[in-house]
Image: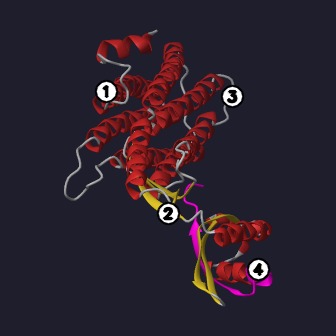
Amino acid sequence: MLSELLIRVFIKEPQDTEDCKIRNLYGYLAGGVGIVANLILFAFKLTIGILTSSISIMADAFNNFSDMASSAVTIVGLKMSSAPPDKEHPFGHGRIEYISALIVAFMVMLVGIEFLKSSVERLLNPVDVKFDLISFSILLVSILVKVWLSKFNKLIGNRIDSNALKAAALDAMGDVLTSSTVVLSFLLSRFTNIPIDGIVGVIVSILILYAGFSLVRDTISPLLGEAPDEDLVNGIISGLLSYNIIIGVHDLIIHNYGVGKIIASIHVEIPSNIDVMDMHEVVDEAERRISEKFKIHLVIHMDPINIDDKEGMETKEEVQKILIEKCYIHSIHDFRIVGKGDKKNLIFDVVVHSDEIADLGLTEDAIAEDVTSVIKNSHPDYGCVIHVDRDFTI
């Protein structure tokens, strides 16, 4: 298989994809192959387009040119994103990979806009397209090349978990569709005087614009701060709860600074009757093991829970049952009773999902008032001090 042969030739230790240097070599290989393949396709298609006066073929040629430029930008982005942390960027430069993908997306959209104009002009002022069997055959070969290139990028993208290369694979498969459409118009031009060339040129241009828009959407999301991977969230939580002294977790926040550069923080609940040094030892071990397992930097905050406070534990259970009816409240934590006699306050956090409370038109103050009102109906002697927490993992 050609893909595996290229990997074996250019990468000495292809299995060690966790190594940053190996990962970059994969990216450089994919980018280099993309440049060479698209440069050849660009030259062939541009020549064919000029010889046959086909605007749709020339549009497809410049689409390949943009793909070649995007491969170059991807290589530069990988190189810059692997730069070590410095004073101005203590968390490294990993997000440059997303920025380079964004640049590529805008380049693709620019090509689409320019050739949409040209295609509309061709519709208004039709020009005869000359059919040539050799040129037609070369276009068919270019489709096969793009199919292989798509599979090659997908293989490497999955192997090193690169969204940029996975997107490149989808973009290449999109090119297969556009080139196939051009071949169809080239063939039909022999049998009709309808300006098929201009019509197909518009279709190709729209497909290019859509591909560019999809790339913009996919690359802006991690830059804005998207929800973390569900498997990572579940892995961190289950890993922590596997320790006997950890009885609960909350406030998990995950920051992504690029592939392999993830920082996470979480609060763990530990019985307060355990020696603080024993707590610290377990938390240190959990931080180390989970960080190594998921290739992240995990920071844990300890929340001591007084499980010997019978009143507090029973009241917490009652409050949880009361709040079941509130669909927008998913859990409570840091529950404690402060004060004595007739002056007791229930202090706790409620966890909500931002999209749900937005749909209901609720503010944090309204939520606190609503929860307090419900609890007061059952426990009028308690005051309530409620903090609203948002779940950042969904």
Q: Residues within 10 Å of mark 2 (few under 14, many from 20)?
A: some
Residue 128 visible at all: no
Q: Nearer the viewer, mark 4 or mark 1?
A: 4
Mark 3 or mark 4, whichever is nearer to me = 4
Q: Report the disc number at residue 22.
A: 1
Q: Which residue is mark 3?
A: 192
Q: Is residue 330 above or below residue 298?
A: below
Q: Earlier in the sequence, mark 2 or mark 1?
A: 1
The residue wearing badge 2 is 304
Q: Which tag, 1 or 3, sits closer to the chain's start?
A: 1
Q: Tell me the residue at 54%/43% (across/down).
A: 119
Q: Quadrant of the C terminus?
A: bottom right
Q: Residues within 10 Å of mark 4 (few under 14, many from 20)?
A: some
In this rendering, the answer to whether 226 lies above or below 331 is: above
The three-letter amino acid code for the residue at tag 3 is: Thr
Tell which circle, 3 or 2, labels the residue nearer the N-terminal end.
3
Q: Secondary structure at mark 4?
A: helix
Circle 2 SS class? strand
**Which region of the structure is painted magenta?**
374-394
- Residue 374, numbered label: 4
Q: Residues within 10 Å of mark 1 (few under 14, many from 20)?
A: some
Spot occupied by residue 284 in the image (x, y as percentages of width and height): 37, 48
Q: Is residue 353 left or right of residue 261?
A: right
Callout 3 touching callout 2 (CB < 8 Å): no
Circle 1 — which element?
helix
Q: Nearer the viewer, residue 363 or 197?
A: 363
Q: Amino acid at mark 1?
A: Ile
Which residue is depicted at the point 54% across and 36% down? Answer: 127
Quarter holding residue 101: top left
Does the segment drawn in magenta span residue 156?
A: no
| Disc nearest the viewer among 1 and 3 | 1
Real-space CA distance between mark 3 and mark 2, rounded to the nearest whole angstrom: 80 Å
